Image (cartoon, grey):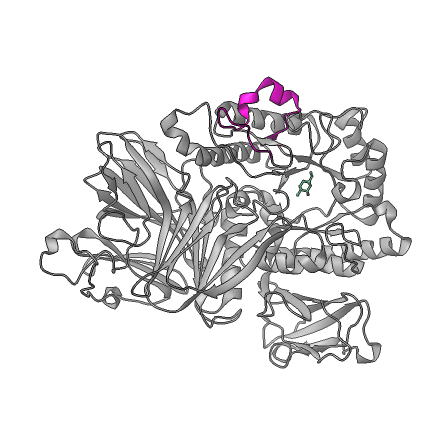
């Protein structure tokens, strides 16, 4: 059993292989958080000594015993307006206006299996290993119960959390905040790492000390956003990639979210995360319940790389329900950067023919195939083919692509509508807007109101209709604006605060139905690049387009930032043309491929513009990728450097779970006239094993310095390391492949 109740100590302990999480039913039924960290046994309640702290309130029944306050004791799920001034997890209001939350233990239950959440994605239990703890707290005055749900995946060092709030009273309750989880770190000195950014610069890692006060991160865009990713790490101030205590929190949510972090008067840290409360309220009638999104939690004592690997395995193996999650994906060629909106059937078929000759498996037709769309001002909503561009329709085009021996993929953006569209003319009220106010535009388009079942039914039927009618193997599912002007004619005035969350639930309803009905189809998420790159989407889609910035040097940071939480297998990454369309930078073709192989590999360029020599190199790249595909998809990932934006070179490594194969990739980002030796150490290998080392250098290096290939001891590569020859020119790269040899 990984969940243990000690009746004498009144502790509930969740053990994973290397971590322990403990709560204790404290005085007056307060549920205290006693510990989360490296695996430890016994009653850890003694860590938290009562102390009389001035101006920290005491529960009335404790009378003159002033040493105990909910304001200083670590809480498992914090209340509000009841003596704890720190961040609240729950705020509810009764019909008489009484508000807050004062939560006390009522009962608990331990059961096998994972728990499910109403209308929300949650971790599954494919290997029949999960256990669930449910602890119910109550607030008798308000008439509510909170069921705290914990899923424990012992071998994975993974704990999931969520809260289920039920109105047990006689009147209506209004939830004003309903966090998924509260996590206390009562001792220690912590850095916060979060992943901020903007369009084409997503998930830039930022690390800094947690100072006193509240730090509030999140998104109010009804999508998880380019600006802040729903994933944070708290780590020891001295933690490195390979050492130190690290906690990761990842809300499984694609809408407006918050991660609030507070360092309080006693230097204790509290993290509260879940749906952003600023634009949230929810009415609960007697007997009704509300499920919060899930949060994934991992703790590792041995550094950031180990923490990332826990999340990689969790997303790939227990969260994503797509059968594609663990399967080889086709190498695709997408026409977006090749043509933008400017194409016809002949041009598309010519690109597809070349794609096949290069060795691609799948051709993706991107934006511009529908309605009368020839730029981004019209036709979203009119998901029928533009016969002017594609005479003979999609049928004939798909037939042509399939005749080449390629699979076919299609771009859609079904959550959006253009004002210039038949859909908008028929249903203007389906677009979000506030009565009496012109709604703001984003990329000249409006957003559909996904809280309405008739809208989500229409989206489902429209996309399902395409998938039923045409032989489509892959869908790129995009959104290209943030949601604003939140108001729905379908909700009464007092329920408008539910709209943002209802839109996210509407999205999940559609994705759930589509992925269940079309399990064969490979779906890739997208939101102007990586604007909705989160665990909620990854529960349905095995991959997401990482960024609209395809410049490989920019991608080094974006993909490195993304790798903290997400596996390579879910990061869409393509080789595009040079000079790059976003930055104008020129890079070697092979370096572009080395970087794109650290992701869902594909191409996004016009192969007709390539020389014969470049085409040969691409054929070799695709062959190489296919050799490494399983290793890259399933292997353990290592960031080899501490610096987030390395000055001279960037390197990363993937090692198979059995430690019998590895690929190290390196890109020189800054050539120097007289550089120090380029020396690095491998990670994750078996020190006892011997490996056959193969070195590919792309392109310019000093030939006399070329190191020896052949057999190396694992211990030598791990401890003594490896020195690369001097490389020069703009952005050369290298790949070092290791294969364990039989003894
Ligand atoms: C977004 C996507 C791009 C492309 C365009 C099409 O920006 O991220 O990859 O599909 O839309 O309009």
Is residue 129 visible in the rendered image? The answer is: no
Q: From the image, which quarter does the C terminus lie in?
A: bottom right
> From the viewer's perspective, is 670 left or right of 113?
right
- As rendered, which of 162 and 95 lies closer to the eye? 95
| Residue 532 in the image, given as x and y percentages of width and height | 56, 44
> From the viewer's perspective, is 489 left or right of 653?
left
In the displayed structure, 575 sits above or below 118; it is below
In the displayed structure, 514 sits above or below 267; it is above
Asked if the magenta segment contains residue 439, the reply would be yes
| Residue 464 in the image, given as x and y percentages of width and height | 61, 28
Give the dominant element type of the magenta stretch: helix, strand or loop.
loop
Q: Which residues are magenta?
A: 414-441
Where residue 32 sits, quadrant-wise, is bottom left
> From the viewer's perspective, is 458 left or right of 609?
left
> From the viewer's perspective, is 709 left or right of 79?
right
| Residue 524 in the image, given as x and y percentages of width and height | 63, 42
Q: From the image, which quarter does the N terminus lie in?
A: bottom left
Label tally: 0
For the point 23% across and 43% down, the residue is 138
For the point 50% across and 43% down, the residue is 254
For the point 43% across and 48% down, the residue is 258
- As rendered, which of 603 and 340 lies closer to the eye? 340
Query: Which residue is the extreme one toward the left?
Result: 64
| Residue 477 in the image, given as x and y percentages of width and height | 62, 38
Asked if the magenta segment contains residue 392, the reply would be no
In the displayed structure, 7 sits above or below 507; it is below
In the displayed structure, 42 sits above or below 354; it is below
Query: Which residue is the extreme one toward the top?
Result: 426
Query: Which residue is the extreme one toward the right?
Result: 612
Quadrant in which ligand 1 is drawn: top right
- As rendered, which of 268 and 240 lies closer to the eye? 268
Is residue 243 visible in the rendered image? The answer is: yes
């Amino acid at each position: 059993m990984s969940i243990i109740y000690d009746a004498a100590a009144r502790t509930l302990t969740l053990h994973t292989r290397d971590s322990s999480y403990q709560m204790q039913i404290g005085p007056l039924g307060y549920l205290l958080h006693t510990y989360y960290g490296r695996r430890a046994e016994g009653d850890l309640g003694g860590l938290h000594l009562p102390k009389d702290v001035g101006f920290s309130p005491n529960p009335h029944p404790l009378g003159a015993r002033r040493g105990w306050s909910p304001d200083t004791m670590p809480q498992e799920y914090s209340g509000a307006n009841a003596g704890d001034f720190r961040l609240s997890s729950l705020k509810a209001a009764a019909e008489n206006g009484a508000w807050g939350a004062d939560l006390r233990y009522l009962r608990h239950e331990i059961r096998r299996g994972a728990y499910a959440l109403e209308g929300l994605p949650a971790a599954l239990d494919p290997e029949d290993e999960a256990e669930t703890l449910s602890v119910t707290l109550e607030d008798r005055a308000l008439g509510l119960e909170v069921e705290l749900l914990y899923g424990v995946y012992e071998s994975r060092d993974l704990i999931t959390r969520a809260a289920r709030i039920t109105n047990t009273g006689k009147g209506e309750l209004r939830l004003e905040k309903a966090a998924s989880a509260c996590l206390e770190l009562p001792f220690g000195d912590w850095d916060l790492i979060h992943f901020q950014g903007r369009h084409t610069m997503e998930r830039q890692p930022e690390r800094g000390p947690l100072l006193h006060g509240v730090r509030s991160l999140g998104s109010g865009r009804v999508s998880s956003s380019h600006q802040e990713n729903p994933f944070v790490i708290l780590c020891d101030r001295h933690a490195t990639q390979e050492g130190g205590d690290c906690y990761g929190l990842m809300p499984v949510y694609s809408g407006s979210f918050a991660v609030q972090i507070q360092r309080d008067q006693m230097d204790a840290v509290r993290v509260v995360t879940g749906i952003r409360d600023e634009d949230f309220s929810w009415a609960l009638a007697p007997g009704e319940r509300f499920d919060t999104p899930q949060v994934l939690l991992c703790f590792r004592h041995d550094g950031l790389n180990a923490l990332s690997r826990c999340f990689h395995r969790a997303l790939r193996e227990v969260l994503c329900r797509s059968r594609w999650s663990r399967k080889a994906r086709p190498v695709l060629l997408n026409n977006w950067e090749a043509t933008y909106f400017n194409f016809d059937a002949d041009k598309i078929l010519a690109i597809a023919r070349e794609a096949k000759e290069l060795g691609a498996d799948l051709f993706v037709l991107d934006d511009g195939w529908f309605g009368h769309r020839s730029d981004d001002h019209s036709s979203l909503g009119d998901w029928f083919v533009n016969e002017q561009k594609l005479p003979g329709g999609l049928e004939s085009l798909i037939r042509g692509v399939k005749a080449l021996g390629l699979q076919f993929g299609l771009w859609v953006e079904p959550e959006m509508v253009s004002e210039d569209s038949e859909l908008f003319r028929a249903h203007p009220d389906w677009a979000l807007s506030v009565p009496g106010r012109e709604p703001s535009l984003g990329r000249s388009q409006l957003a559909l109101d996904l809280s309405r079942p008739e809208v989500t039914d229409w989206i489902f039927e429209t996309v399902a209709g395409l998938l039923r009618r045409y032989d489509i193997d892959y869908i790129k599912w995009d959104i290209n604006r943030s949601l604003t002007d939140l108001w729905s004619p379908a909700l009464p005035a007092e329920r408008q605060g539910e709209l943002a969350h209802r839109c996210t639930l509407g999205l999940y309803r559609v994705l759930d139905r589509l992925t269940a009905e079309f399990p064969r189809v490979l779906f890739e998420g997208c939101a102007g690049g990586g604007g909705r790159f989160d665990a909620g989407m990854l529960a349905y889609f095995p991959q997401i387009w990482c960024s609209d910035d395809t410049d490989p040097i920019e991608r080094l940071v974006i993909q490195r930032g993304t790798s903290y939480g997400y596996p390579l297998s879910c990061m869409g990454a393509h080789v595009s043309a040079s000079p790059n369309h976003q930055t104008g930078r020129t890079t070697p073709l092979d370096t572009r491929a080395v970087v794109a192989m650290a992701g869902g590999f594909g191409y996004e360029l016009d192969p007709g513009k390539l020389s014969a020599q470049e085409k040969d190199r691409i054929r070799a790249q695709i062959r190489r990728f296919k050799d490494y595909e399983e290793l890259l998809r399933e292997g353990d990932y290592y960031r080899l450097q501490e610096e987030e934006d390395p000055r001279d070179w960037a390197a990363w490594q993937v090692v198979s779970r059995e430690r019998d194969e590895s690929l190290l990739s390196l890109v020189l980002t800054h050539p120097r006239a007289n550089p120090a030796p380029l020396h690095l150490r491998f990670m994750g290998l078996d020190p006892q094993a011997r490996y056959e080392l193969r070195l590919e250098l792309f392109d310019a290096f000093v030939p006399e310095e070329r190191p020896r290939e052949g057999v190396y001891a694992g211990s030598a590569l791990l401890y003594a390391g490896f020195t690369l020859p001097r490389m020069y020119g703009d952005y050369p790269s290298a790949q070092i492949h290791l294969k364990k040899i039989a003894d």
